[in-house]
Image (spheres, rainbow, N blue to C red):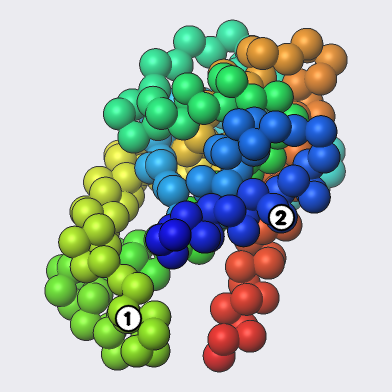
Amino acid sequence: MTTETNETELALELLRTAFPGRSDRQLMPLGMVYCGTRWGRDFRFHEVPLVNGQPLLACNNEEEAGIYFAWLAEHLGELNAEPNEKQSQLCMLVKKMRPTDAALLLGMHAAFYLRETESMELHIQEGHSFEQYFKEVETLATAEELAEIDKKKERHRYEQVEEELMEWLELAPTVGHVDAAWRAPLAVVIQKAEKEQRVELLNVFYGAFFRYLEEEEENDQQKE
């Protein structure tokens, strides 16, 4: 067995316990995310609602979150979003999943993607080349961590994140909602569900995002 196969099987074992009653085929997309499969962001669908004549660019309290979720559930239910190349496979995967599982997967993936690319974004914002970024990676990583890094894939991810950052700065630099980068697959999930379930699915997405983001931050702190 390869290392990748072992990691996938371990992830499936954990997921079978966490999601009883699902087949391995239903669990496979979640296993892919646990094992490192990532899809890029898309900021083309970045609309926000107006509240008292002002765009709601972020939610600072429960009242604003309630307004935003109600608007977003309706907006995504009607959104005709053709996914970009980076998210086309992701959209096909979530279309086959249970809506609740799909919303959880998207939130989990968004958290992992943010944590794995935030260092890249900082370097890009400073105008650093990939080589400058990777030199820091080599300096900070342990020998074991460095052995697992594929420099070619890391370079591709760096270039992809640079493109995404430029797209965000061009289209939606003031929009602070996490879902703005994942609306094409979220629309697929929302449109599969009954209207009365849609706000709850958004709660699942955001709940998973913040839970896994916190877990990733705790894991990083334990490594220091």
Q: Neighbour class for label 2 at 10 Å: few (<14), some, many (≥20)?
A: few
Instruction: Give the side of residue 27 with respect to residue 133, left or right.
Output: right
Residue type marked 2: Leu
Q: In this rendering, which labeled residue sits more in front, label 1 or label 2? A: 2
Q: Is residue 204 above or below residue 119?
A: above
Q: Where residue 9 appears, x then y in whole percent?
A: 58, 53
Q: Where residue 87 appears, x then y in whole percent?
A: 40, 31
Residue drawn at (67%, 76%), measured in percent from left and top?
A: 218
Instruction: Give the side of residue 92 with respect to residue 139, left or right.
Output: right
Q: Neighbour class for label 1 at 10 Å: few (<14), some, many (≥20)?
A: some
Residue 14, which numbered label? 2
Q: Is residue 111 above or below residue 151?
A: above
Instruction: Give the side of residue 126 with respect to residue 129, left or right.
Output: right
**Is residue 127 among the parts visible in the rendering?**
no
Residue drawn at (19%, 61%), measured in percent from left and top?
A: 152
Quadrant of the frame with the C terminus: bottom right
Q: Is residue 24 above or below residue 77?
A: below
Q: Image quadrant of residue 211?
A: bottom right
Residue drawn at (41%, 61%), measured in percent from left and top?
A: 2
Which badge, 1 or 2, comes first in the chain's sequence? 2
Q: Which residue is mark 1?
A: 146
Judging depth in this view, the residue of 128 and 138 nearest the camera is 138
Q: Where residue 77 appears, x then y in whole percent?
A: 64, 13
Q: Is residue 119 above or below residue 117?
A: below
